[in-house]
Image (cartoon, rainbow, N blue to C red):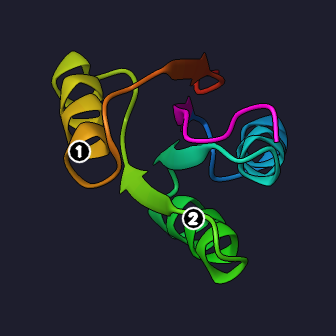
Amino acid sequence: MRLQNKVALITGGGSGIGAATARMMASEGAKVAVAGIPDDGVLSVASEISAKGQPAIGIPTDVSDPGQVESAIEKTANPIGPLDILVPKGGI
């Protein structure tokens, strides 16, 4: 597993390319924080990854708000470790 024990934060992870990226990184061994909106999509993707035995958390985050982005980074570090990889897929 190429990303074993790495911690990745993926914004826009609740659907589309962001969700696919989160799943792929988890399959390669990364601990994944899935951030973005809608909340239910983010939480669903994180739950799906966790159900397969890989550490994952969902963090509802509006990436247009710098305070929420900073909070997502902090919430990633607390339960799963300091950030190694950032994948900015959120946005319009």
Q: In the image, residue 85 lies at what x, y percent?
A: 54, 20
* 64 is higher (above) or lower (below) than 3: above
Relative image position of residue 62 (x, y in whole percent): 37, 36
Q: Main secondary structure of the magenta part?
A: loop
Cα gap from disc 1 to disc 2, whole angstroms: 14 Å
Residue 67: where, in percent of width, then height? 16, 24
**Residue 76, position as x, y percentages in the image:** 32, 42
Identity of the residue drawn at 57% across and 64% down:
46
Give the answer, above or below, for where 4 lies relative to 56: above
| Residue 35 part of the magenta-drawn span | no
Q: Residue at x 73, y 77 (%)?
A: 52
Label 2 CA crowd tier, 10 Å (few <14, some 14–19, many 20+):
many
Give the quadrant of the N terminus: top right
Nearer to me, 35 or 4: 4
Please name the residue that numbered disc 1 is placed on: 75
Count of numbered circles in the view: 2
Residues shaded magenta: 1-10
- Judged from the image, the secondary structure of the residue bearing numbered disc 2 is helix
Quadrant in the rendering for residue 53: bottom right
**Amino acid bearing label 1:** Lys
From the image, tell me which residue sits under label 2: 46
Identity of the amino acid at label 2?
Ala
**Which residue lies at the image location 75% right of the left edge and 41% below the top edge?**
25
Q: Secondary structure at mark 1?
A: helix
As drawn, the residue found furthest toward the bottom would be 51
